[in-house]
Image (cartoon, rainbow, N blue to C red):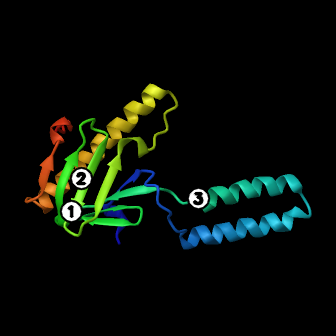
Amino acid sequence: MDLEKFALIKYDHGEPVGLSGARWGALALILGAAVGALFVFFPLVIVLGFAAVVAARPPRRLYVGPRYLICGRKILYYANVQKVSMEAGGGRLLLKSSTGKVLVLEQDRFQTGARKPDKIAANKAARFQKVARKIVKHVRRAAPHAVLTGLEELPATGT
């Protein structure tokens, strides 16, 4: 899988994700150093323990590629999509495939670095709309037979 072709979006999909080999190695190294330092420096153990927790938590991302979408453990090929619908509030995008899988993208699950509540809401909405436009564009190209409903609320791109 060539990850250079994917758009990586920080998205909390709520599913468990396994650790990569590099993260397992870093976790083992940090825990080994923490156990070794336990006998020498107790404050260092606390810092290394915190580093181990950070290294063990895998990133949660949404991979939007040219032919398919990866969200957690779900892979959805755009050519298999039969229905795309946006809920009335505009906060959820539902993708139904021919295999019976349903993928739901929620606006509130997108991550942002903003601190103020109004900025957080605006950033999440903007990121959700950008990703939804990109997904709809790929679905229209790969599955012209797909039924698109509720996408009138999705603002058009400037290009």
Image mark for residue 117: none
Q: CA distance from mark 1 to mark 2?
A: 8 Å
Q: Where 97 sits versus 118, above or below?
A: below
Element under label 1?
helix
Give the percent coordinates (x, y) of residue 56. Answer: 62, 62
Label 3, on which residue? 57
For marks 3 and 2, the one nearer the N-term is: 3
| Quadrant in which residue 58 is drawn | bottom right
Amino acid under disc 3: Arg
Residue 149 as seen in the image, left or right of residue 16: left
| Quadrant in which residue 89 is drawn | top left
At a point 34% along the width and 69% down the height, the residue shown is 2
Q: Are marks 1 and 2 in contact (CB under 8 Å)?
A: yes
Q: CA distance from mark 1 to mark 3?
A: 29 Å
For marks 1 and 2, the one nearer the N-term is: 1
Label 1, on which residue? 78
At a point 82% along the width and 55% down the height, the residue shown is 44
Q: Residues within 10 Å of mark 2 (few under 14, many from 20)?
A: many
| Quadrant in which residue 87 is drawn | top left
At a point 49% along the width and 38% down the height, the residue shown is 113
Residue 42 as seen in the image, left or right of residue 120: right
Amino acid under disc 2: Ile
Labels in figure, total: 3
Amino acid under disc 1: Tyr
Label 2, on which residue? 135
Give the percent coordinates (x, y) of residue 108. Answer: 41, 41
